[in-house]
Amino acid sequence: MREPVRHIRPEDRVPGPETLGMIREEAVSTGQTWAGLVRTAPGAVSGWHHHGSYESAIYVLSGALRMESGPGGHRVTDAEPGDFLFIPPGVVHRESNLTDVEAHIVVVRSGSGEAVFNVDGPEHAGDVPD
């Protein structure tokens, strides 16, 4: 028998995996999908991390999102409300909010295994899958 549709209200979200500089609120976590809301304070910069075998789709609701990735973290992508970003599996990155309002982004990930790997920097990918 299939599970019924689930309704997850804001008060039903639970703390998600931690990365310095951001607050993850988990709404859905199954063996293949992770979805939630991520909040980043004005001027905050997250720690470097990747999402293992997960691919991630991000939608910016408010504030702005600067994504640093690539060799040495020198690839910079800026997104604002209404923009989507896609992060392939294993890409080491960090996020910042250069605005004066808290950034809110919706994140949906598809994959398996651990969903967050915190690393020392863009050159320390750790367990990035092939």
Image (tube, rainbow, N blue to C red):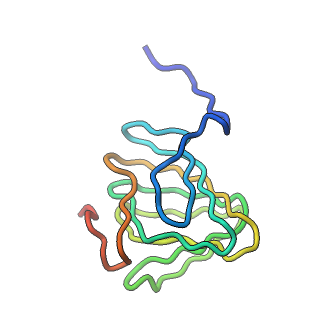
Nearest the eye: 71 or 104:
104
Check the image and report above or below for 115 versus 98: above
Is 21 displayed left or right of 9 in the figure?
left
Quadrant holding the N terminus: top left
Q: Residue at x 49, y 48 (%)?
A: 16
Check the image and report above or below for 115 versus 27: below
Quadrant holding the C terminus: bottom left
Check the image and report above or below for 40 versus 107: below
Q: How many marks?
A: 0
Nearest the eye: 39 or 88:
39
Q: Residue 105: horizontal and vertical position, in percent? A: 63, 57
Furthest-right residue in view? 100
Q: Residue 17: horizontal and vertical position, in percent? A: 45, 51
Q: Residue at x 35, y 69 (%)?
A: 119
Q: Residue 43: horizontal and vertical position, in percent? A: 66, 75
Nearest the eye: 45 or 71:
45
Q: Residue 61: horizontal and vertical position, in percent? A: 70, 58
Is 10 displayed left or right of 50 in the figure?
right
Is 103 displayed left or right of 113 in the figure?
right
Q: Quadrant of residue 70?
A: bottom left
Check the image and report above or below for 91 versus 28: below
Q: Residue at x 67, y 39 (%)?
A: 10
